[in-house]
Amino acid sequence: MNRWLFLTLFCFWALAACESKRVRVRDTLRHGKSDDRSGNGEVHGQDVIPTGAELDSSLLSLKKGPWAATDDVMSQDWKLDDADQPHWNEVFWDSSSDTRQYPELALFRDYSVTENARCRMRTGKWKLYKESRALILRFGDGFSRIYFIKGIAMKQMELIWRKTPNDSVLIKLSADAAIHKRSAEDPYHPVNNDWRIKPKASETDEQLRLRLKQCVHFYALFFHDNNQRQLTEISFSGLPTCFVWYNGGIGMEARADLDKKWIDCFYSTFQALKAYEMLSSILRKHDLKWPEHPTSWVKQTAEVLDQLCDKL
């Protein structure tokens, strides 16, 4: 048996063993090809030793050793990269708005989950049944979904979603093999996205202020996270916001140009505009201290947003 195939199969056997708490996970998917002709669901590919700069101390790198806990490998922000051709539009295209979607699956070590932080967000809990390789997602709105793990490595995963007994969807996902040591510091953790859940009744000024504070805190964490991962390109696609981001500055959208997704985070347009004025007033009244010698505009923005959050 090919040595690389043996390593991959070993990962699967370990994942399926209930008594095993740690697995040896190798980067066998990134440059390999998925091949299910054996009928066993294994993934064939060549072994790749990842390289890169040291991560921020707040992050845990899963690449530092050949062994990683199964839950740690699972507990990443998985970006959906591809789906089989018959189902691609269903997964990546919103027919109602005629726009490309960027679905994600953020799993955390406390078994919280945020699905699709950039489109149709839902939060809830996840559970992995190792014997059957079933990944169960249960959301706060009562909806649930079952995936089956076809293949997993530190930075890539393949899931099968059985829509009906006769219709299955193959989905390919990728991650960067880095997780927050404290899950609550990840911007996509459910606790940091409560502000995006539309309230069922009109809110008081104090409740609106809290929702704004949570919004600003989310973006502070978002910029911190991008800086900690040393990302040079930041995507805001799908995230509800009232801000305009500059290299070395923060502005606010004009009232007439406010993002509908941001407005929909509030009970009504009236309440959203009231919150907008609260934030605008604070920005006018308080001078935010920008670092004099910034090493990164991303880090600089995160620190200023921390200050703004403290003012709310």
Image (spheres, rainbow, N blue to C red):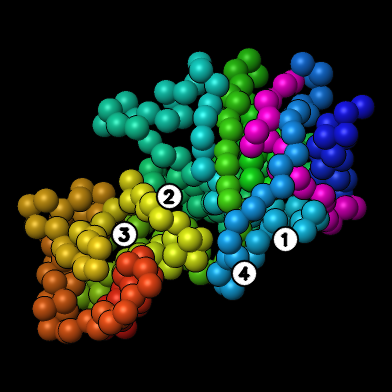
The residue tagged 1 is 64
Q: Which residue is at the front of the view, 197 or 63?
A: 63
Q: Tag 4: Cα neighbours inside 10 Å, few (<14), some, or many (≥20)?
A: some
Q: Going 38% across and 36% down the picture, which residue do you hit?
A: 101
State yes or no: discs 3 and 2 in contact (Cβ < 8 Å).
Answer: no
Instruction: Tell which tag, 2 or 1, sits nearer the viewer.
Output: 1
| Residue 117: mark | 2
Q: Earlier in the sequence, mark 1 or mark 3?
A: 1
User: What residue range appears in magenta?
Assistant: 19-36
Instruction: Tell which tag, 4 or 1, sits nearer the viewer.
Output: 1
The location of residue 286, given as percent across then percent down, is 17, 84
| Residue 199: mark | 3
Magenta span dominant secondary structure: loop
54 to 145, vertically: above or below: below
The residue tagged 4 is 181
Q: Tag 2: Cα neighbours inside 10 Å, few (<14), some, or many (≥20)?
A: many
Q: Which residue is at the front of the view, 129 or 239?
A: 239
Q: Going 9% across and 57% down the picture, which residue do you hit?
A: 255
The location of residue 185, given as percent across then percent down, is 51, 69
